[in-house]
Amino acid sequence: MTITAAMVKELRQKTGAGMLDCKKALEDTNGDIEAAATLLREKGIAKAAKKADRIAAEGLTSVVVKGNEAVLFELNSETDFVAKNKQFTDLIEGLGNLFIESNVASAEEALALKDASGKTVEEVVLGATATIGEKISLRRVIRVKKSDTQGFGAYKHMGGRISVLTVLETPNEELAKDLAMHITVFNPQFLSRNDVNQSTIDVETKVISEQIANDESLQGKPEKILNGILQGRLNKVLQEIVLLDQGFVKDPSVTVANYLKSANNNILSYVRLEVGEGIEKRVDDFAAEVMAQVNK
């Protein structure tokens, strides 16, 4: 059977695969477009599997809000270049719309979710890996709910390099968004001092104690003074990592706690996602790679 350009074009539009791959698939299936699409999908999944050991530490995060529910998620790629690709950003948008209309609250649940065509999100992501040519992976999905009397604030930085959601005690869209921007910039580890775990206190205390012990100018100082210095430095560290103790981004002369008090409001919780945080990124030695090819 003769494979026409129109048939190749139709298959490309249907699958997103390359022209030569489409032509070969049509030849292998005697021009049956549906069978060719299935064959390409099978090959695409095989290609995706070969990319499974690659590190996908770039990509984008997103936050989608609808009514009293919000979803934050992270979709990873191998390079920042692909993260700016329209195919990737369209995928982010589509997944966000799908997630917010569902009840998924984790990446595992999200991957099993089916879209309007009956494909699972896992299949969609595998398909994207095949057509885009890089490993694409859904890493985190977090669902947040609020009551009618509470307020959301959402902010995306640099198109989704960082996404933040805040939940206020009472609705105040401007304040909630300002706090989300603050959290984007200062990346607090804890909401309040009550949330700081003992292991963090222990680690910081140990670090400060060693700094004091190694400071020649403090040698011979009374124990009471050294303890005072220790507590003072520990307090400064906590001011840097606790949201309510940080100087507010719009007015550093007042703490976030005091700013909220002046606005007669309170922040109940927040979520901050940054692309690639916690992933060990691969560092390639380009020169060594080139020499390895030369010496083959």
Image: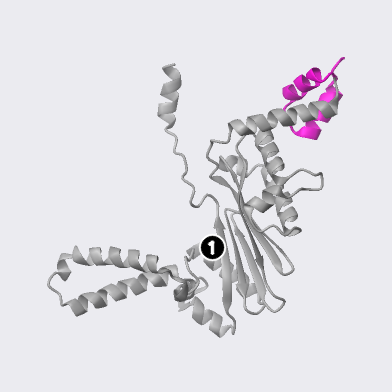
Residue neighbourhood size for the residue with mark 1, other residues' Cα within 10 Å, grouped as few (<14), some (14–19), many (≥20): many
Q: Is residue 52 visible?
A: yes
Within the magenta stretch, is there residue 57? no
Residue appearing at x 36%, y 72% in the figure? 236
Residue 136 percent across, percent down from the top left: 62, 41
Q: Amino acid at mark 1?
A: Thr
For this rendering, which residue is in front, 270 or 197?
197
- Give the main secondary structure, helix, strand or loop, of the magenta stretch: helix
Indicate the quadrant containing the N terminus: top left, top right, bottom left or bottom right: top right
Residue furthest top as drawn: 1
Locate residue 257 relative to residue 206 in the image: left or right.
right
Dividing the picture into quadrants, the one containing residue 178 is bottom right
Q: Nearer the viewer, residue 2 or 80?
A: 2
- Residue at horizontal 48%, vertical 71%? 243
Q: Which residues are magenta?
A: 1-30
Determine whether, in the image, residue 141 is placed left or right of residue 25.
left
> Quick one: 196 or 215, which is closer to the camera?
196
The answer to whether residue 9 is visible is no
| Residue 41: image location, x then y, percent | 73, 31
Q: List the residue tagged with mark 1.
A: 184
Q: Secondary structure at mark 1?
A: helix
